[in-house]
Image: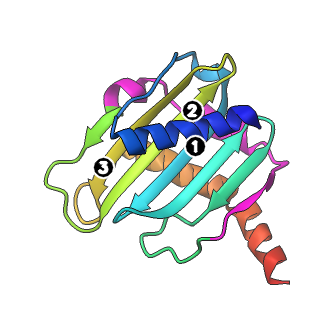
Amino acid sequence: MARMMTIIGIVLVITMASTYLYAKKQSGVQNIKAILIKLDVEDKPNMFLLLAADGSINRFGTGAIENTDKDMYIGTIKEPVFNELQSRFNNSWFEKYRAFIEENRKGKQCKLIIAVQNADGGEAGMQLLYGTDSVGLPTEIKEFTQTAVSLTNPWYTRQQEMVKK
């Protein structure tokens, strides 16, 4: 759990210091033990997803631009969701998109942060700025983020239903 808190620290460093890359070390993709995806729309939290190899999961929001669900759900997930998401991650993204800023952004301003923590303690992150009504995210990043949401939606929906009861 302490190491998962470190990945949250990465997000704060990236956001508060307005840096685009924070990395102590980068190891191979096979060593990733936690993945964080955070989306802000118009500087307001829209979605947060932290998924760890041990099955720990924290999530709020759907990623939809007009998201209204701000409740954070924390627990564990038994499905092999982490392994599936990890298999879709590509370390080369840190080189290609570590400081992605879409030119001529139109629409609502979005900031997507993706950070990973490796088994050896290394951490890396990237920040992507784009507009809702312009070209948007690079295709592979968009697909990765959508996959993360899709893979965790069954768990997320169960959490929402339990709270309603």
Res. 138 in view: no
- Magenta region, residue range: 71-96
Q: Mark 2 sits on what residue?
A: 116
In the foreground, 123 or 12: 12
Q: Indicate left or right for 101 with 139 as reference.
A: left
Residue 55 forms part of the magenta stretch: no
Q: Quadrant of the N terminus?
A: top right
Which structural element holds mark 3?
strand
The outermost residue toward the left is 104
For image coordinates 37% across by 45% down, the residue present is: 139
Relative to residue 43, is residue 69 depicted above or below?
below
For image coordinates 46% across by 56% down, the residue present is: 39
| Mark 1 neighbour density, 10 Å: few (under 14) some (14–19) many (20 or more) | many
In the foreground, 88 or 16: 16
The outermost residue toward the front is 16
Relative to residue 2, is residue 143 depicted above or below?
below
Q: Mark 1 sits on what residue?
A: 36
Q: Mark 3 sits on what residue?
A: 129
